[in-house]
Image (cartoon, rainbow, N blue to C red):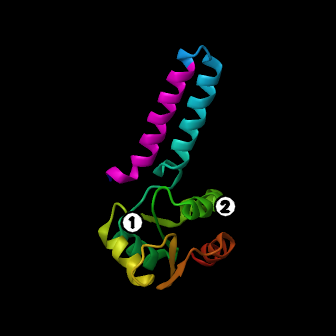
Amino acid sequence: MMRTWTLPTLLVLGGAAVATGQIRSGSPGAATAFLLAFLALAGVYSPLIFPRSTGALEAQRRSAVDGRPVVYWRPGCKYCMRLRIKLGRSARRLHWVDIWRDPTAAAAVRAANDGNETVPTVVVAGQSHTNPDPEWVREQLSRSV
């Protein structure tokens, strides 16, 4: 859980340090701009832009019932962010599992990727797909339920 927030926390602290330096040098406008930029980056790299994560076993159970894909991801992963952003609102319909919060999920990803924790790994009908095209995922989602 803690490493999920490490990068966003460092970005906020770094932004505060840069803003403090700008204020001390007499540039409150630049300080505000830097702080806002660092806060935006912290938001992007936080788990906040992703739908609420469930556990791996719960996601698998739900997927078996409704046929929706399961997405294994981790905060800070640029490919996960790309998938999430490109899916837009339809991303909420997927079952998202944070591998840093669930050791079972991390093990499932390693099993699907030759021992590597490569994300995003999307599981559709029991088949794993590593870093798939967002359009393909959207198509798979439209086929479910």
First to last magenta residue range: 2-22
- Residue closest to the far front: 25
The answer to if 101 sits in the magenta stretch is no
- Residue closest to the far left: 103
Residue drawn at 60 percent across, 64 percent down: 83
**Label 2 element class:** helix
Q: Is 59 left, or right, of 29 in this rendering?
A: left
Marks 1 and 2 sit apart, C-alpha to C-alpha, by 21 Å
- Residue closest to the far top: 26
**Residue 88, picture quadrant:** bottom right
Please tell me how crowded label 2 is: few (under 14), some (14-19), or many (20+) other residues with Cα within 10 Å. Answer: some
Q: Amino acid at mark 1?
A: Ile
Earlier residue among tags 1 and 2? 2
Is the Cβ of the residue at disc 1 closer than 8 Å to that at disc 2? no
Height in image: 125 above or below 103?
A: below
Give percent across and percent down for residue 7: 44, 47
Query: What residue is disc 2 on?
Result: 86
Give percent across and percent down for residue 39: 54, 36
Residue drawn at 60 percent across, 30 percent down: 34
Query: What residue is disc 1 on?
Result: 99
